[in-house]
Each structure stands twice: as structure tokens, then as C-alpha cells.
Amino acid sequence: MEADLWAFERNAHEMGCRIVAGIDEAGRGPLAGPVVSAAVILPDGVAIPGIDDSKKLTPKRRHDLYDRLYEVSHAIGIGVVDAGEIDRINILQATLGAMAMAVANLDPRPDHLLIDGIFTIASDLSQQAIKKGDSRSISIAAASIVAKVTRDRMMDQVDELFPEFGFGRHKGYPTKTHRQAIQQHGCCPIHRRSFKGVKEYVESDR
């Protein structure tokens, strides 16, 4: 039986919340680039066929759904924290900060948040952390798609500045070819120098 992707949103409405936003991030695991979060407010009951956790979708399907979400959503907010700040405060705090930033960029302001994962954010809004929320809540699934496509497009742009690393292909994730490029070329300005797989090469890069 298929999961009811509207269940968490409906429960929030039954508790008296009028505007519910789903929040998710992309880019916790890469060795380079920012962590990007998205917050999405969907109209009640809007039909978005094929929506799911972004990791389960093909790139083309993600891009199609991204365009659809920007057409139908009441609001979308984006939060971005760059590699330097990730190194300074750690990836968890950077992720939570990007999520809070995405919520702050929403208009209208939500009165309830559904957040993918096990952590809530620094906010006075009521909120619920949902483990594997990107496959259980339609609002979080929407946010996962927006965050992923937004970050992928940013990495495609960076690829033009640092073509030797192949960011357009792996988006900064620790693939074999990315690790080999770091070994060969050292680090570039968007590498996360506190991450294993990068920090070993920081000294030789100075």
C-alpha cells in the first residue's frame, strides 16, 4: 500500500496550523560545495504526480518536478551555507543553519514546519522532525527536489571555473574520479578542508 504523503500535513492542519512548510537539504556528504536547504509551502491537496524523495528520481524527473513545484507552490525559500562556513561550524550546524535560512526566506511565514531527519532548527515556530521524511511527507519531498536541483545547478556553474575537478559530473561527492582529482590538483576554494578526503591534501595545497 502506498504511503499517504499528505498525512503529516493533514495532522498539522487538524492541530490548528494553517500554513505548513516542508524542509530538506542537499549536500551534506560531498567533499566540496555548499549545503543547500529548501523550504516549500504547497497548496492543500495539490496534485504533483510522481513526487518522491529526490534521491529516488532521475535527473530529468527532478528537473521536471522542480519546474512544476515553482509553478504551484505558495512559497519556496532557499538557504545556502558555503564550504568555508561548513569548515568553521561543522556540517550539522551548517545544515540546520541553511534550513533556518530557507524558512526565513518564505513569504508567507509558515506556522508549522515538517523537517527531514531527527533534528529541529532554531525557530519559534512549531516543528516536527521526521525520520526519512522525504519519502513520507509531500512537502518534505518537494523540498528535497528543490534543494537537490538548486545545488546541482550551482555545482554545474562551479564546474566552469574548476573543470579539472569534474564538479558537473559528481557534484562534489566523493567519487573515485573526484578523489583522484584532489590527489592530482590539490584543493580548490570550494573544497571542505575539514572533511576526510580533502584535509589530507590541504598542507600540500598551501
Image (spheres, rainbow, N blue to C red):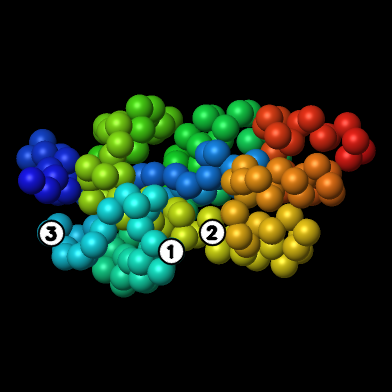
The residue depicted at 68 percent of the width and 50 percent of the height is 177
Task: Determine the CA span between mark 2 and mark 3.
Answer: 28 Å
Q: How many marks?
A: 3
Amino acid under label 3?
A: Gly
Q: Tag 2 or tag 1, which sits nearer the N-term?
A: 1
Q: Tag 3 or tag 2, which sits nearer the N-term?
A: 3
Is 8 rendered above or below residue 155?
above
Taking the image as drawn, is residue 69 in sight?
yes
Looking at the rendered structure, which numbered label has been put on residue 59? 1
Task: Determine the CA span between mark 1 and mark 2.
Answer: 10 Å
Q: Tag 3 or tag 1, which sits nearer the N-term?
A: 3
Taking the image as drawn, is residue 113 in sight?
no
Crowdedness near tag 2: few (<14), some (14–19) or many (≥20) residues, C-alpha within 10 Å: many
Amino acid under label 1?
A: Pro
The residue depicted at 69 percent of the width and 58 percent of the height is 166
Residue ID for mark 3: 45
Look at the numbered discs 1 and 2 and tell me whether their residues touch, using CB distance below 8 Å.
Answer: yes
Crowdedness near tag 3: few (<14), some (14–19) or many (≥20) residues, C-alpha within 10 Å: few
Mark nearer the viewer, 1 or 2 = 1
Looking at the rendered structure, which numbered label has been put on residue 138? none
- 205 left or right of 191 in image: right
Q: Could you tell me residue 159's position as x and y percent?
A: 69, 62
Q: Secondary structure at mark 1?
A: helix
